[in-house]
Image: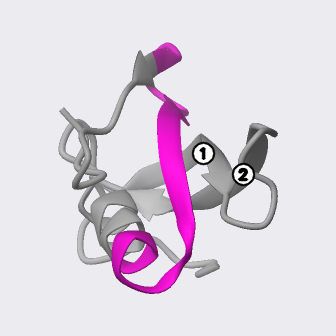
């Protein structure tokens, strides 16, 4: 995790709770907490992470819940490409 804001002052600390099913235990829903400085509402850093996940990690993302320090929590469900919408 970076400790410095990125590229502009509009980047804010963003926390995402990612729920996923792993290939080793497909019957269990697991969660992972991701945090970094990101730019709402498009979340380019989170999108990069989810894109990396889709290419390299053998697990299916079921949902992503995003919280930032300026906006209320909201649930976001990725499509099969794990893109936020």
Q: Nearer the viewer, mark 1 or mark 2?
A: 2
Q: Is residue 28 left or right of residue 14?
A: right
- Identify the residue shown where x is 37% and y is 70%: 54
Residue 27 place in picture, x, y as percent: 77, 39
Quick check: 15 above or below 37? above
Specify which label sits upstream in the sequence, 1 or 2.
1
Residue 25 place in picture, x, y as percent: 81, 55
**The residue tagged with tag 2: helix, strand or loop?**
strand
Q: Note whether residue 71 is visible.
A: no
User: Could you say which is closer to the camera, residue 14 or residue 23?
Assistant: 23
Residue 70 place in picture, x, y as percent: 45, 26
**Image quarter in which the N terminus is found:** bottom right
User: Could you say which is closer to the camera, residue 7 or residue 47?
Assistant: 47
Q: Are marks 1 and 2 in contact (CB under 8 Å)?
A: yes
Q: Is residue 55 magenta?
A: yes
- Identify the residue shown where x is 81% and y is 39%: 28
Residue 14 place in picture, x, y as percent: 52, 47
Quick check: 27 above or below 34? above
Which residue is the site of mark 2?
33
Which residue is the site of mark 1?
15
User: Residue farthest to the bottom?
Assistant: 56
**The residue tagged with tag 1: helix, strand or loop?**
strand
User: Could you say which is closer to the camera, residue 44 or residue 61?
Assistant: 61
Q: Tell me which corner region of the image, top left, top right, bottom left or bottom right, holds residue 8.
A: bottom left
Quick check: 72 above or below 77? above
- Identify the residue shown where x is 39% and y is 64%: 50
- Identify the residue shown where x is 60% and y is 45%: 15
Which residues, given as a range, are shown in magenta?
Answer: 52-74
Q: Crowding near pointer 2: few (<14 within 10 Å), some, many (20+)?
A: few
């Amino acid at each position: 995790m970076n400790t410095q804001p990125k590229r502009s002052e509009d980047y804010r600390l963003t926390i995402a709770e990612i729920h996923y099913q792993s290939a080793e235990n497909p019957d269990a829903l697991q969660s992972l907490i991701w945090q970094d400085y990101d730019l709402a509402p498009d979340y380019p850093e989170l999108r990069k992470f989810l894109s990396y996940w889709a290419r390299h990690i053998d697990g299916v993302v079921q949902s992503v819940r995003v919280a930032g320090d300026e906006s209320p929590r909201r649930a976001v469900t990725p499509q099969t490409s794990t893109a936020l919408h």
